Image (tube, coloured by chain):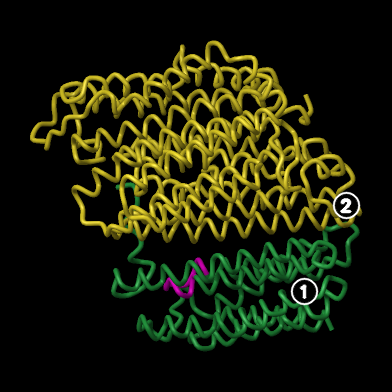
Chain colours: A yellow, B green
Amino acid sequence: MIIYYFIIAIALIGSLFFTRSKILHHILLMLFNALQWGLTVYAYLHLNREELSYFIPDGAAMIMLLVLAVLSSASSYHSAGYLEYHHRHHTTPHRAKSIYYAAFCLLIVAQTGAFLSSHIGVTWVFVELTTFAATVLIYHERTEYAIEAAWKYLFVCSVALAFSFIGILLLSIAAQEAATINLTYSSLIHNAVAFNPFWLKLAFLFVLIGYSAKMGLFPMHTVCVDAHTVAPPPISAFISTTLMNVGFMAIFRFYSVIAPTSIATWANYILLVAGILSVFVAVVYLIRVRHFKRMFAYSSLENMGIVAIGLGTGGIGYYAAFLHLIFHSFTKAGMFYQIQQVYRIFNNYLIRRTGGYFHYYNSGAIIMLLLFVCITAMPPSGLFVSEFMILKAMAEKGYFMLLILLLVLLTFSVWALGKNFFRLIFSPPYGNVPEEKIKPAESLSQWALLGMVFYLGIYPPVELVNLIHAAIITLPH
Amino acid sequence: MIHVFLITFTITLIYIGIANRMSTFIKILALQGILLFGLSFSELHDISTLNLVFILLETILFKTIVIPLFINYLIKRNKITREVEPYLPNFASLVIVTLIILASSLLSMTIDNSPVYTIYFVVALSSLFTGLYIIITRRKIITQLMGFLVVENGVFILSLAVGSKMPMLVNTGILLDFFVSVLVTGIFVNKIGDVFKEPDVNHLSQLRDL
């Protein structure tokens, strides 16, 4: 089945690239989404069955695939709206649309491959492919900013991925010394206890630094921030959610390999340090940020920091980390879709040039308010549940100093986010804006995403809980 | 023989650190390509012929001929000045590159029991950090790219250490080369040259927190 998925997807991408008609584009895009959902359902029905010798839909991959399928449908819808709007106001060449759609679908295919792959090298190849597709999309608006952001994204990601490749090579040196030449995750998890800890430590450092560019975690986070600011909003929604999940998965798979070995405690400390530094950097910038999309980008950095802390803490933290990723993906994607509609009213992403959103668009303002409740992890949002679990895990492990530090930083971030959100929603109308009426139906996807964040937080279905447990089953408890 | 290639490669790293002209820089990159060719020829004797031919072609054709010619073309087309224009004086670069090599050797001494891989490890790590050093301290986009090529050469050397048993990893590394070098330089250096008059990284600093 996966082979058919790749063949059909490539055919669709090719046709998207070569057609210029709007209706054909929409039909092809719908077909692609149907294909994506088809693969997701198929993978769920055939869990843990190996295909093409390098792809296994296991629990972790399945969760990420579901999130990806939901967000690719929503992003497709908003992409059409975005291109329509952008085309009306700017003179982009006509083929830019075709390139956009083709790169968009390629990005989804690359992410699917990265989630499903069961071989450490194959994962890396697909992650590299996401870089290429994302760069093309960041460059879409063809402004000087776009060139700068695209160049930085491509260059820094390539250097970072060279780092993670070195990490993989170091791991393979360790594997070869222990007479293992099979680099699939299951074989590595099985044999890693016999590996030389020196190579493993070095490999983990390189892999973590490398993939942190994708996950948006501390050492290489800057590249993601710039990319968010410039990329079209539906693409920012991807870079900030599913693409970060790709980075997380790459790090998580490697972490699962070393979790049974003697260096697990050391790796946990590294993750905790990377996590808390991410939160710290994010909060420092959140306080002085002036651009909505940059603010969302730093908020993503903060949330990825929390996820890394959850992973490094262990225990219930593993479970919470996955839960947090799911909720964060839905919330952050909703924020980027909504900010695109904010832009259509105010024609600006700068926070000081907005205000009185209620006056212009009622439904959107309520969505923004609910998104604020979600992203600051207030009850009853799902993020509250996951964040609370992570804090609980930290208390159980006795990391009290870190817990207090994290809570102080989170308080600052709530204040910073609140200041900017409330300025947008409640301040007096900014006035003199080219008012564009937005139909409430255009915000339906945000309502759906919000509904899922609230619902899944309160009543997580048994199937989802089982999937998360299957994802973390190899980790020590 | 392998040791001769690896040590010569390390010497080229020092030379790259102090190279003053773009043309010298490019010639060293070509020389590194030849060294990698020799290295893979003498190291990878027990992999399949097709794989070997592919890897040899990559080193000799791609790294030694195509990329240097391509960079030369880009320099001419975009009228890039012929000086490397580092931020730091050459003497400082010399000291830093030497320190990088020394630190890599010291790090490798702490490995317990793998003498086979040690020298590969030292050379690869030195190459990696020299490349990063060049990326950080050179002013032009094109020199940053050349720094990246040095990083890639380091990755290639490390992949040769496990290449006999796992040729797939060598091929994957080559994929990195193709991806980045061809697509990226082709699309971007041209575009950046068109939009900004002088292809200098200082122009690429508009995106920041105000």
Residue lying at the far left of the rendered structure: A432
User: In the rendered structure, which segment of residues is drawn in magenta?
Assistant: B135-144
Q: Are marks 2 and 1 on the same chain?
A: no
Chain hosting mark 1 = B
Residue A433 vertical position relative to residue B163 in the rendered view, above or below: above
Q: Quadrant of residue B118?
A: bottom right
Q: Is residue B139 magenta?
A: yes
Name the quadrant of the N terminus of chain A: top right
Q: Position of residue B12 (x, y in %)?
A: 65, 82
How far across and down, in percent of the image, does residue A318 sit? Answer: 67, 27
Q: Secondary structure at mark 1?
A: helix
Is the residue marked by circle 1 packed among few (<14), some (14-19), or many (20+) residues within 10 Å? few
- Given residues A424 and B187, the one toward you in this image is B187
Disc 2 residue type? Answer: Thr
Given the image, what chain letter belongs to the residue carrying mark 2? A
- At x 12%, y 36%, the residue is A433
**As displayed, is residue A371 above or below residue B53?**
above
Residue highlighted by disc 1: B50
For the C terminus of chain A, the quadrant is top right
Residue behind mark 2: A180
Tell me the crowding category of disc 2: few under 14, some 14 to 19, or many 20 or more residues within 10 angstroms, Cα based: some
Q: Where residue A342 sits in the image (x, y, percent)?
A: 25, 33
Magenta includes B104? Answer: no
Task: Tell me the element at label 2.
Answer: loop
